[in-house]
């Protein structure tokens, strides 16, 4: 993708929006809310996510998603899933950026960048991994997005030093594009607090951090989920995921949402709360309820 195009797009976005964003977040709690596209996976139809498509729901793509959030919830901060991009060409990314501008929105994170072969893989194809990482870092830069969350995937054993070695070239490139690399407690086997903190310690870089999630580990126990959140929050930079629990196999496992919100305040977190409804029932109603609950604590 053309680096000059990315630079022009990024500088224009920063000049247009950075001056007011800090004031807005300080004076309007709703300005601290974001929403990602995962709760609305039934609305998208991309090759990687086709299995989630629900034909009874309206069809969206990433170009339309910021307007959908603004019109439906009054939310103007967007967290995109890479898997919901219809394509990754510069022309399509420009359309997505135009959709963000149309909605008077901003992109706050790319959530769930996957490296082929997995970052724990000691035999990772380094050239292929660098290409995949650079692709999404370039897209983040083009969208004036401050961070990208990378999946700590791959085969066992899950060695932090292996993941860190595979990540260093990607992290160096992200630093050059002013994009932070974040990690997310999504997988109990690969992305526990211990594992994420070990990777961060091995990287030892201010350009790496966390995107803590309130409720992903609630099926193990609300106490375990809360402890994970508290351990990751000191490394959170610009975003966390606010959810009140998670549904698995038709059963809802509740998070201690009040305690989670108190933990973010105690840690001095000042970033965005990305609403990631993963409960039972329709996504729109679920996000609305989660938004009301989050605002009560902000």
Image (spheres, helix red, strand yellow):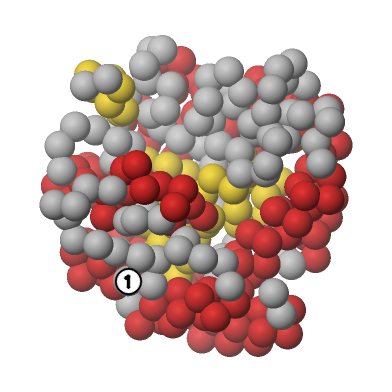
Q: Residue at x 60, y 65 (%)?
A: 140
Residue at the spot of label 1: 64
Task: Say what secondary structure mark 1 lies in.
Answer: loop
Which quadrant, please, contains the N terminus?
A: bottom right
Q: Residue at x 71, y 46 (%)?
A: 208
Residue 23: image quadrant is: bottom left
Taking the image as shown, residue 22 lies to the left or right of residue 219, namely: right
Q: Position of residue 227 (x, y in %)?
A: 50, 20
Taking the image as shown, residue 143 lies to the left or right of residue 287, namely: right
Asked if residue 219 is positioned above or below residue 40 in the image, the reply reads: above
Q: Position of residue 27 (x, y in %)?
A: 35, 66
- Residue 127 shows in the view: yes
Q: Nearer the viewer, residue 227 or 68?
A: 68
Q: Nearer the viewer, residue 166 or 86?
A: 86
Q: Residue at x 71, y 53 (%)?
A: 133
Q: Nearer the viewer, residue 271 or 123?
A: 123
Q: Position of residue 220 (x, y in %)?
A: 41, 12
Q: Position of residue 39 (x, y in %)?
A: 30, 46
Q: 10 Å neighbourhood of mark 1: few (<14), some, or many (≥20)?
A: some
Q: Residue at x 61, y 44 (%)?
A: 114
Q: Nearer the viewer, residue 227 or 145?
A: 145
């Amino acid at each position: 993708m053309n680096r000059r195009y990315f630079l022009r797009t990024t500088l224009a976005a920063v000049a247009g929006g950075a001056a007011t964003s800090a004031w807005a977040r300080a004076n309007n709690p709703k300005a601290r809310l974001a929403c990602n596209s995962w709760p609305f996976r039934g609305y998208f139809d991309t090759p990687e996510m086709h299995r989630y498509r629900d034909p009874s729901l309206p069809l969206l793509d990433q170009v339309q998603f910021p307007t959908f959030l603004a019109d439906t919830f009054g939310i103007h901060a967007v967290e995109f899933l890479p898997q919901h991009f219809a394509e990754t060409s510069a022309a399509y990314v420009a359309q997505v950026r135009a959709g963000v501008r149309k909605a008077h929105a901003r992109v706050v994170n790319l959530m769930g960048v996957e490296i082929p072969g997995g970052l724990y893989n000691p035999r990772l194809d380094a050239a292929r991994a660098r290409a995949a990482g650079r692709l999404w870092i370039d897209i983040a830069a083009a969208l004036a997005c401050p961070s990208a969350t990378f999946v700590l995937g791959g085969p066992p054993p899950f060695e932090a030093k292996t993941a860190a070695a595979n990540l260093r070239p990607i992290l160096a490139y992200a630093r050059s594009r002013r994009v932070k690399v974040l990690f997310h407690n999504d997988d109990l086997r690969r992305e526990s607090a211990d594992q994420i903190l070990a990777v961060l310690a091995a990287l030892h870089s201010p350009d790496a951090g966390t995107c803590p999630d309130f409720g992903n580990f609630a099926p193990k126990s609300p106490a375990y989920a809360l402890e994970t959140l508290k351990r990751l929050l000191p490394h959170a930079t610009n975003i966390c995921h606010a959810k009140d629990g998670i549904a698995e196999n038709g059963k809802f496992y509740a998070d201690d949402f009040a305690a989670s919100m108190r933990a973010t305040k105690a840690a001095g977190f000042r970033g965005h709360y990305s609403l990631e409804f993963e409960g039972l029932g329709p996504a729109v109603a679920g996000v609305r309820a989660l938004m009301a609950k989050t605002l009560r604590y902000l």
